[in-house]
Amino acid sequence: MKNINENEKTENPLRRIKLTVAYDGTNYVGWQTQPNGVSIEEKLDGAVSRLTGRPTRVIGASRTDSGVHALGAVCTFDTDMQMPAEKFTFALNPLLPDDIVIQASEEVDITFHPRYDAKGKIYVYKILNRRLNLPLQRFDTYFYYKSLDVERMDEAAQHLQGTHDFISFASPHFTAKTTIRTLYECNVRKDGDIITIYVKGDGFLYNMVRIIAGTLIRVGAGAMEPSQIPAIFDAKDRDAAGPTAPAKGLTLVETLY
């Protein structure tokens, strides 16, 4: 009979577990672990490490800024635990704070990478547009008391669709190799007092969605014309676009694969 050494008896092959995570980013410095505050990544690393019994790092699909929220952030981690993949959701959630909740867990191929295999992302930016603020919506909407013209905003948003050089809509601190991006959809809708800017694209530069939102707000306020969007692209200058809208109104809705 063939002898089996102890390592072969006890060690299981590594599995890659994919997590879909929702979080309220209000109390965090963003996704990425940083020395200046608590991050989403740090909390997930801690929960996964406690569950697996060994130091474990999660790998995220994207990095959200301080104060930005998510419904469909994606990350992965490797483990030799043989728990059914869907059970990791229920095992990890009690180890996380109430403002971070795993929505789904599944096993993926060990070669899967949450960032490099992503085909795109969907974001929404929400604006509470009324005379007075509402306390129950203070965390995930940007309060703007001056009346905004949604039709003008949506007209401007149509100019943003397609493949363009979005360098005018990027923070000067971006590190991407190229500033060419494709927006598959960009529109603006209003439901009651809530204006929602919906953006679906193949990728986004640093602060890109927030700068788009700030620009569309300027259009809605009458400080800029919808027809000026092409000129902003041509300028290739951050100063040509509108301001960066506050982080609190931005939510990562879904990472696409």
Image (spheres, rainbow, N blue to C red):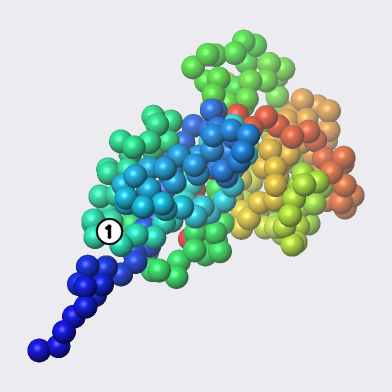
- Is residue 184 in sight in this rendering? no
Residue at point 74%, 54% (across, down): 175
Q: State left or right for residue 251 relative to residue 213.
A: left
Secondary structure at numbered mark 1: loop
- Residue shown at the point (58%, 26%) measured from the top left: 141
Q: Position of residue 227 (x, y in %)?
A: 83, 42
Toward the viewer: 197 or 96? 96
**At which x and y percent is residue 23?**
46, 36
Q: Nearer the viewer, residue 213 or 150?
A: 213
Name, please, the residue furthest toward the right: 235
Coordinates of residue 81 in the picture (x, y in percent): 27, 58
Work out which residue is located at the far left of the displayed protein and give it: 1
Image coordinates of residue 57 in percent, x first then y, are: 46, 53
Which quadrant of the figure has residue 207? top right
Compared across the picture, whether 151 is left or right of 87 comes to right
**Residue sitting at x 34%, y 37%:** 95
Residue 243 visible to an observer of this rendering: yes
Q: How many marks?
A: 1
Quarter of the figure with the N terminus: bottom left
Q: Nearer the viewer, residue 244 or 17?
A: 17
Q: Residue at x 38, y 68 (%)?
A: 109
Q: Is residue 54 above or below residue 66?
A: below
Residue corresponding to mark 1: 81
Q: Callout 1: 10 Å neighbours few (<14), some, many (20+)?
A: some
The three-letter amino acid code for the residue at tag 1 is Met
Q: Nearer the viewer, residue 103 or 182?
A: 103
* Up-down relation of residue 109 to residue 68 (above or below): below
